Image (cartoon, grey):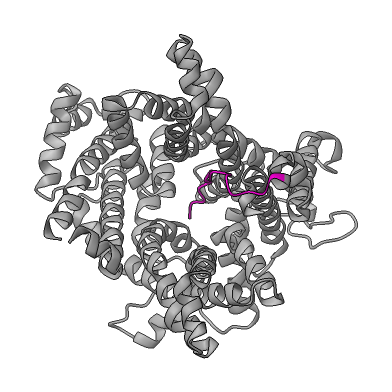
């Protein structure tokens, strides 16, 4: 089992290495001289010469990459051109906000998606199934930022129930933090709820056709026990791993939600960096997100391994 | 969220159902037909925008700023007095074009690479799949934002960014399908009579893997339309004063309490066209894969 875990972990390394190459090569896309692009408005030759030397832009690309990856391995993602703050520091400052938002969104997705998927599968062909499918399809078709704008209009502007924007740290005021995060978390989690609903429905339909469910029914167990203890428990195995992957998607989806609700998180960091042409921050955020996504993928695999006794028995 | 089309063997399908052509199976699903009709309607309106739009999309009117819905302006006017209906119609052009072009970019790179990886295998396959894995590890929107940022913010670059970000899915899908098809007897037969690899790939393998790719492409247009709207919403896609649903929503969010119609109609248009593409994609998947029916 340990060998399996190690092997699975090692498979990530070449992928991660290629990710670093892709992220590094992003700067090649900059039109014209990267030093000029990095200098922005400042066209002072001395500044441009300094930037060229500072970022090793006068060296061949492989040498530049070697310098850059050397820094990355030591945890140095460079520094913001605008604020001169280390990129890792900026990420560490903004990340907790986005993680909180993504976790709350995942709670919404699980709380809505899994029960809806179960009901839809168990009552296949009924009105409930039709409604759940229709809502699921709409959930996949509504852009999150538009859903956010519409909810602000109804919930904040018309009804005045929740704040339209802003963020309060949970350490300052937990209740106010929850009030400011409910709507963004719902908006962010809506699409994931739809995905979870569809997958849970599919997994439940398969599970409810399985021999062990027929056996459970033949033993005379009540339907609720058959559904929950035999159907749902088995159907949840693939859904749990899907949850880990969806969490990665939520981290990137937070970009739009944070923009709509003016939440100072990770997503807002990359958007602001794009507009201030702070390319080191953009590269740092992409690299960090890709690494987090790879790790979540790995976690999903390990989770699948942990909750699936058959797979554990096969690997030994 | 990524919807990946799959192709299952059709051995268990009853003969009568298997014999039904794809078109009949597609037409038997009302939701798919409705989806196709709505897509067609949007395409016709987008193509005929200069004829059907009641006003000039960039024509400002300072005496009609943020006017609500009326007979003169069915969807109201925006912050510069421009007719919202006109801009929704013209915005459809940008969104549909972005959806189709970005998927075309993804297909034109992803399908050949997937064909090569699946058909030849070995080191080529290994290298291509590691690069694909690395691209798939970068979350789609973040990668598209980064590419748009480095390429420069405009609609063309947004389409390139979305296309490149979408491409790995097609590499993976095509490779998977090729791996299934290349061991079929008709491919063996084509090889046995001395056909060169390129001919086998293009004449015998490619036509037999197209079904799932078409389905995935349809679903990818839906997500690409949302992606273009997202990039334009962030200011990285279509630039003002050109009309785009995403950039209209970006402006509208600042006037949500005074002029909610500015946000309502472009958003509804996105929802409707994306929903239509999703219904069309689901219908095509079921038509190509009879076990789903």
User: Residue B102 placed where, x, y %?
Assistant: 54, 35
Q: Quadrant of residue A43?
A: top left
Q: How many marks?
A: 0
Q: Is residue B2 magenta?
A: yes
Image quadrant holding the N terminus of chain A, namely bottom left
User: Residue A246 placed where, x, y %?
Assistant: 41, 61
Camera-side residue of B287 and A289: B287
Question: Principal SS element in the magenta part?
Answer: loop
**Residue at 60%, 78% in the rendered image:** A155
Q: Is residue B10 magenta?
A: yes
**Residue at 56%, 30% in the rendered image:** B208
Using the rendered image of the protein, determine whether residue A182 is visible from the camera's viewpoint: no
Camera-side residue of B100 and A266: B100
Q: Quadrant of residue B129?
A: top left
Camera-side residue of A211 and A265: A211
Establish if A314 lies above or below B26.
below
Left or right? Give the position of A235 relative to B128. right
**Residue at 20%, 58% in the rendered image:** A315
User: Residue A37 placed where, x, y %?
Assistant: 32, 31
Magenta part of the chain: B1-15
Left or right? Give the position of B257 relative to B59. left
Using the rendered image of the protein, determine whether residue A298 is visible from the camera's viewpoint: yes
Camera-side residue of B159 and A302: A302
Establish if A242 lies above or below A109.
above
User: Residue A169 placed where, x, y %?
Assistant: 32, 77
Image quadrant holding the C terminus of chain A, namely bottom left
**Residue at 60%, 39% in the rendered image:** B99
Establish if B185 lies above or below B191.
below
């Amino acid at each position: 089992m340990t060998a399996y875990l190690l092997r699975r972990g090692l498979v990530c390394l070449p992928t991660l290495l290629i990710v670093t190459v892709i992220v590094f090569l992003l700067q090649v896309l900059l039109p014209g001289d990267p030093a000029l692009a990095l200098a922005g408005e400042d066209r002072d030759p001395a500044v441009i010469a300094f930037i060229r030397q500072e970022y090793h832009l006068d060296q061949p690309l492989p040498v530049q990459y070697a310098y850059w990856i050397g820094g990355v391995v030591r945890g140095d993602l460079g520094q913001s051109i605008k604020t001169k703050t280390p990129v890792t520091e900026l990420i560490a400052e903004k990340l907790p906000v986005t993680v909180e938002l993504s976790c709350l969104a995942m709670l919404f997705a699980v709380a809505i998606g899994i029960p809806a998927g179960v009901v839809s599968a168990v009552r296949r062909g009924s009105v409930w199934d039709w409604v759940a499918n229709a809502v699921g399809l709409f959930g996949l078709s509504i852009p999150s930022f538009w859903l956010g704008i519409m909810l602000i209009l109804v919930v904040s502007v018309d009804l005045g129930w929740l704040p339209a924007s802003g963020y309060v740290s949970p350490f300052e005021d937990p209740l106010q933090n929850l009030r400011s995060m409910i709507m963004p978390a719902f908006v962010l989690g809506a699409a994931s709820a739809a995905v979870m609903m569809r997958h849970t429905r599919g997994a439940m339909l398969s599970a409810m056709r399985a021999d062990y469910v027929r056996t459970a029914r033949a033993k005379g167990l009540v339907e609720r026990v058959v559904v929950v203890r035999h159907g749902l428990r088995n159907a949840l195995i693939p859904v749990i791993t899907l949850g880990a992957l969806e969490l990665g998607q939520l981290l990137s989806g937070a970009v739009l939600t944070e923009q709509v609700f003016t939440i100072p998180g990770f997503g807002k960091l990359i958007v602001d960096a794009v507009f201030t042409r702070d390319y080191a921050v953009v590269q740092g955020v992409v690299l960090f997100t890709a690494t987090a996504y790879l790790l979540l993928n790995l976690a999903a695999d390990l989770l699948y391994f942990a909750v699936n006794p058959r797979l554990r028995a096969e690997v030994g | 969220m990524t919807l990946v089309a799959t192709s299952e063997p059709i051995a268990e399908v009853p003969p009568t159902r298997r014999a039904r052509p794809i078109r009949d199976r597609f037409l038997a699903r009302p939701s798919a037909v409705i989806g196709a009709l709505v897509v067609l309607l949007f395409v016709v309106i987008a193509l005929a925008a200069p004829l059907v739009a009641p006003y000039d999309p960039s024509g400002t009117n300072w005496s009609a700023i943020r006017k609500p819905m009326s007979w003169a302006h069915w969807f109201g006017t925006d912050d510069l007095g421009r007719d919202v209906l006109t801009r929704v119609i013209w915005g459809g052009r940008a969104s549909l074009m972005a959806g189709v072009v970005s998927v075309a970019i993804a297909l034109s790179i992803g399908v050949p690479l997937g064909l090569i990886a699946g058909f030849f295998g070995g080191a080529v396959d290994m290298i291509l799949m590691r690069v694909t894995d690395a691209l798939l590890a970068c979350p789609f929107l973040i990668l598209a934002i980064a590419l748009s940022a480095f390429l420069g913010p405009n609609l063309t670059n947004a389409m390139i960014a979305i296309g490149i970000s979408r491409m790995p899915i097609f590499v993976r899908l095509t490779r998977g399908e090729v791996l299934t098809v290349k061991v079929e007897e008709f491919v063996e037969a084509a090889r046995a009579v001395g056909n060169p690899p390129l001919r086998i790939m293009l004449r015998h393998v490619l036509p037999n893997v197209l079904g799932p790719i078409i389905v995935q492409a349809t679903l990818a247009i839906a997500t690409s339309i949302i992606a273009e709207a997202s990039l334009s919403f962030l200011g990285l896609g279509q630039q003002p004063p050109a009309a785009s649903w995403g950039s209209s929503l970006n402006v509208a969010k600042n006037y949500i309490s005074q002029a909610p119609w500015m946000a309502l109609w472009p958003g509804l248009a996105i929802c409707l066209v994306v929903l239509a593409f999703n219904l069309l994609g689901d219908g095509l998947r079921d038509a190509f894969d009879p076990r789903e029916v």
